[in-house]
Image: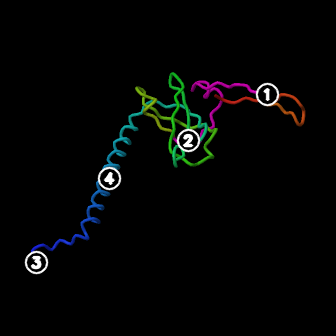
Amino acid sequence: MKGNNINTDLIGPILFCGIMFLLFFLSHKDADEYNKYEKTFKGETIGLATRFERKGKIDYLRYYFYANKKILSEIYSNDDNLVNKFFRVKYDLNNPEKGNYIVLEELKPDSITLVKAGFTKTKYYIYDGGVTCKYIEKSKWK
């Protein structure tokens, strides 16, 4: 039939490209809306990155901060140099558990700043059985 010039071999790739464009557009729209939401975060404090956790094939950096209580959160990251370091955290004053993000620029806060941010210094002991056979006192921020 000469009236039907549609090449059926092109329908699959055209449909695939259309779906991919739609998904790309919708994901950028959601990202733009979240970026606008992030700009409304008025709370700011210090957070401590504690460890990495793997969920499926994705690594997450776990961190916590204090906003009237201890709040645990996580972000996608595979940089293991971030663990046990302090960072600035921005959060939603109305819902800090859901609305927060960590700014991955390392801070070097002093002890007064850490206490004001809700952290406490705790002592712990390590047994040095091979050298001195004594307990060695250490401390860390929690």
Label 3 – label 4 distance at C-alpha: 36 Å
Residue linked to disc 3:
2
Label 1 – label 3 distance at C-alpha: 89 Å
Tell me the residue at 49%/31% (across/down): 44
Q: Amino acid at mark 4?
A: Leu
Q: Which mark is residue 23?
A: 4
Looking at the rendered structure, the secondary structure element under dot 3 is: loop
- Report x, y in % for residue 136: 82, 29
Q: Earlier in the sequence, mark 4 or mark 1?
A: 4
- Report x, y in % for residue 93: 43, 27
Snapshot quadrant of residue 94: top left
Q: Earlier in the sequence, mark 3 or mark 4?
A: 3
Tell me the residue at 27%/65% (across/down): 12
Looking at the rendered structure, the secondary structure element under dot 1 is: strand
Tell me the residue at 50%/25% (across/down): 67
Snapshot quadrant of residue 30: top left
- Report x, y in % for residue 33: 34, 42
Label 3 – label 2 distance at C-alpha: 61 Å
Looking at the rendered structure, the secondary structure element under dot 2 is: strand
As for residue 123 lying within the magenta part, the answer is yes
Q: Which mark is residue 137?
A: 1
Residue linked to disc 2:
61
